[in-house]
Amino acid sequence: MTGFISNIQRFTIHDGPGIRLTVFFQGCPLSCWWCHNPECIPDFINSNGFTVKEFNEKQLLGEIRKELLFMDESGGGVTFSGGEPLKQPDFLKNMLIACREEEIHTVVDTSGLAAQKIFDSLMDFPDLFLFDLKIIEDILHRKYTGVSNRLILKNLETLNNHNKNVIIRVPLVPGITDTDENISNIIHLLSGLPNLRKINLLPYHAMAESKYIRLNIPYKLSGIKTTDEVRDNKIKEIFLRAGFDTSLGG
Ligand code: SF4
């Protein structure tokens, strides 16, 4: 079996514990206005300087093994990100099993959007999920990501019910995801999911804009201010006060 991979980044430190290898899967069912990896959204793209490579499991495992020394010394491992890794579920599952056999720590960085059957069949394999929670109000979720959040929230509930190891990542996009209403909706939702207590808030930055220009895709957030540190810290305080183990940055 093969998987389509848009990029492999070495020595990453924000995609899970320790020093990691981050593997970016090609293809994502969402199209978030703030996406930092717009080249990963289509199922296949090979233009404007962005290439997609096809790997079989053995080849990808070979790339992962090259970093074993750093991973072991730092308590790191491999992070499957994207795009949406769950969009290539069989390849992802095989990689998770192969890594487990070699005792390599695995993280799946996901939007949470996958059919329930797929999600259920995969959830036992990663050591940790990084689960993006963007917008609770579904009309706004559809507007800013192109899809409903119904399945995403269902899958999040499944992780809670099975007491999986999860860090929820909330991108703080000014005026879109960082609004008082959305933050209070997130806290309200999580109050019903007591096993999910770790939050990582991700400040917004516009570094991806140049990629949009290269890909000739309009950047819909052009002109909005980048991160507002005071506001982001205030949001961190709100989550801390609500009892969450909260970090800001990443
Ligand atoms: S879910 Fe992630 S990869 Fe997919 S469009 Fe949104 S930000 Fe980009």
Image (spheres, rainbow, N blue to C red):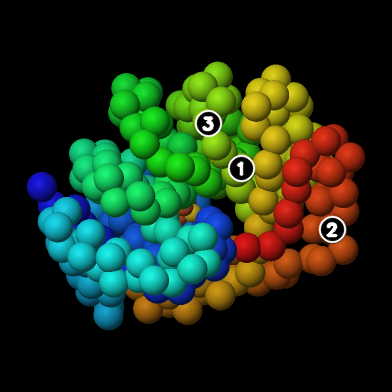
Which numbered disc, 3 or 2, marks the residue that appears first in the sequence? 3
User: Foreground: 184 or 241?
Assistant: 241
Q: Which residue type does callout 2 highlight?
A: Asn
Q: Is residue 234 visible?
A: yes
Q: Which residue type does callout 1 highlight?
A: Ile
Q: Is residue 209 left or right of residue 10?
A: right
The residue positioned farthest toward the left in the image shown? 1
Examine the rendered structure and indicate whether residue 205 appears above or below residue 129: below
User: Foreground: 88 or 176?
Assistant: 88
Mark 2 = which residue?
233
Question: Where in the figure is residue 57, as x and y percent of width and height?
Answer: 17, 54
Asked if disc 2 is less than 8 Å from ligand 1, the answer is no
Q: Residue at x 42, y 51 (%)?
A: 105
Which numbered disc, 1 or 2, marks the residue that appears first in the sequence? 1
- Marks 3 and 2, how far apart in space? 27 Å
Q: Is residue 169 left or right of residue 185?
A: left
Mark 3 = which residue?
164
Asked if disc 3 is less than 8 Å from ligand 1, the answer is no
- Marks 3 and 1, how far apart in space? 12 Å
Mark 1 = which residue?
168
Q: Residue at x 73, y 54 (%)?
A: 247
Secondary structure of the residue carrying numbered label 1: strand
Image marks 1 and 2: residues in contact by CB distance under 8 Å: no
Q: Is residue 3 left or right of residue 189?
A: left
User: Foreground: 209 or 197?
Assistant: 197
Give the number of the mark in front: 3 or 1: 3
